[in-house]
Image (cartoon, coloured by chain):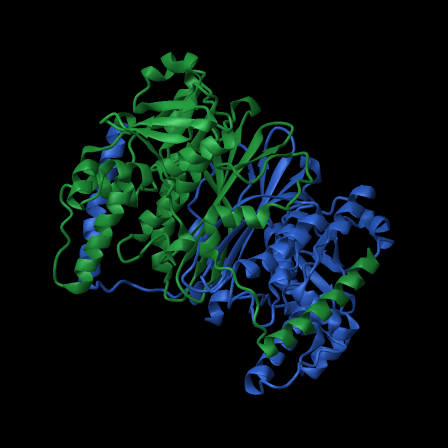
Chain colours: A green, B blue
Amino acid sequence: MFISVRVSYLYCFLATCCYLCSMLANKNQERTSLAKLGEFGLINHLTEHFKIYSSSTQKGIGDDAAVIDNEGFQTVISTDMLMEGIHFDLAYTPLEHLGYKAVVVNLSDIYAMNAIPKQITVSMALSNRFSVEALDELYKGIYRACSFYNVDLVGGDTTSSLKGLGLSITAIGQAKKEKLVYRNGAKVGDLICITGDVGAAYLGLQILEREKQIHDAHPGVQPVLEGMDYLLGRQLKPEARREMIQLFDEHNLVPTSMIDVSDGLASELFHICTQSGVGAILEEDGVPLHPQTEEMALKFKLDPITCGLSGGEDYELLFTIDPKDLDKVKYMPDIFIAGEITEASEGVKLHTKGGNIHAIKAQGWQHFQKD
Amino acid sequence: MFISVRVSYLYCFLATCCYLCSMLANKNQERTSLAKLGEFGLINHLTEHFKIYSSSTQKGIGDDAAVIDNEGFQTVISTDMLMEGIHFDLAYTPLEHLGYKAVVVNLSDIYAMNAIPKQITVSMALSNRFSVEALDELYKGIYRACSFYNVDLVGGDTTSSLKGLGLSITAIGQAKKEKLVYRNGAKVGDLICITGDVGAAYLGLQILEREKQIHDAHPGVQPVLEGMDYLLGRQLKPEARREMIQLFDEHNLVPTSMIDVSDGLASELFHICTQSGVGAILEEDGVPLHPQTEEMALKFKLDPITCGLSGGEDYELLFTIDPKDLDKVKYMPDIFIAGEITEASEGVKLHTKGGNIHAIKAQGWQHFQKD
């Protein structure tokens, strides 16, 4: 032990010297841009060599949350990082809403495992342009989310940043082992189900971006937001699908696979298909769109179904069920059957209202490609 | 349920309108600077109204880590956020060391609960100045820490930032309920123990800052780092005190209270005293300083004991034991008995080598006061 510590200090010392020298020499290193790999490619690239040491690690990277066995309840853990200027724009996001949403998006990941969120930790990095009153607003939102979803704030870290606000939230949930639902359990013939509706949050964002542009160009003009309350609410104050998990429990339904819709329906369906080793056929008719979504998409000259498939941040649940469980979901409110799982060789396809079959592309959010 | 959702959308819509209007009106709000409260004051202020909903929440905010009961092993969770320009300067921190250290500081919090870290999650926010090769370096450090401490990387989030690198790591550990050690268990008459030595990481940082200043002023000058390997190692590549937790277990020792030394020995002793409702008398003779720490402190015209008390990032363990356990620790390597717990009314004091008694002030890191 002592020797290894000594060696590591020596290593460290040498590495630092080399590093400082290379800094001085301005050494040109090979450089692959992050955009080349994309977010999921980057995660795979960085984590592929990591080994699993603990028998308590039931599920590591690659699902909505990690799963840890405690020889009692399973612990389910999910974490998200939100950065100002990337995930939110404080020009049109009230801090209270931001706090609320930051919690909800993490709880959504826990529900997507068919688990119950119990605790969160909140880490914050703040520049000194933030006042205590501003943080009070943020925490009012966090508090409201904790109260509404009955989760406990149990820890975190508060530090400063050179620029902007950074939020990192970790949600911790509990589930019995036999209740957990992963992304990799979909079987050929399973039915694809979606809760609520999709695409609205994306259009809410388009409206807010438009109003910001108008405001920047014409500072005196009042924002026009009438008739858009649903879309704005979906963007600014989304809710996680807690009641669905309760319904599943009451009806003794365990989906075969499940994921929450944060990056867009198409992207999530690809995750399920890839991890389950299956294909899928999605019915355009079955993709639930809110009337305001359809109307606003057309005003923005966008195809409503594209908004539904590729718009992110819906925080609905996409899940698959064994056909024998159809009777259980048929009468559950707000669940739409939108297609069927097929052989992997069939790919992931959309059956349009017009009767055509198209391959679906997973777009989702590509952080690094937007840079 | 449906009604409450409708109401919340309406609320949201109205709030957004008001917010956008107030944005347009440039409303002057009351403003209290973060510096006024300080980090711990801010955390208390923001979290004092939060309730606990889950019976599984054994310990929330206020210790090295939160504790969750699973009707089996207890889950121990700790999280830290590291921001470029605040916690590290990439001008002199090799990315591999940064990755290693970011993991270690979190594991240290888990060990400080007398628990064994088993998993971590890693969230990153990156500006597009980072290449895949740079991240490979960072992950090499994370990988080395995971291998050395046998912890599993089980999740995280990777996103972009407008400026700089942000890292948020959450460590998850396990312990039997009866083994957990909190900050609030110190009793009058308990002995105060410190592992290893303190103050060295702070001086390592001073050296690196000095070399950076020299380099900025005279770009051609080579850094002079001979004879400082220990101090640099303590700053750039600290280790967590895993072997102590193993020793405690082998000798069936459960400290009465424990904390890791991240913000400075004095600050940590204050945490133990405040939470345990006790005072303390620390012997200057008992505060372990490395010879390089003493030597370099004098070169920087600093008082070595002040570096030991107020320098941060040592990642040693500060703990208290019942005097009847003295025989158990007496022969454990690298543990120093440095004082005694007293009545709260006695305050927290230092007994100097010269025989004087001084009140100790907790300085620690005050992020927001540096802004």
At a point 41% along the width and 52% down the height, the residue shown is A367
* Closer to the camera in the image, B208 or B3: B208
* Closer to the camera in the image, A178 or A30: A30
The quarter of the picture where the C terminus of chain B appears is bottom left
Say if residue A29 shows up in the picture: yes
Residue A266 pos. (x, y %)? 37, 36
The answer to which quarter of the image holds residue B284 is bottom right
Residue B289 sits above or below residue B8 on the image: below
At a point 62% along the width and 66% down the height, the residue shown is B94
Residue A48 pos. (x, y %)? 60, 45
Residue B70 sits above or below residue A164 on the image: above
The answer to which quarter of the image holds residue B214 is bottom right
At a point 60% along the width and 50% down the height, the residue shown is B64
Q: Is residue A149 left or right of residue B349?
A: left
* Closer to the camera in the image, B235 or A365: A365
Q: Is residue A99 left or right of residue B312?
A: left
Residue B193 pos. (x, y %)? 75, 57
Residue B286 pos. (x, y %)? 78, 65
The answer to which quarter of the image holds residue B291 is bottom right
Residue B226 sits above or below residue A69 on the image: below
* Closer to the camera in the image, B36 or B278: B36
At a point 69% along the width and 68% down the height, the residue shown is A15
Q: Is residue B205 left or right of residue A366?
A: right
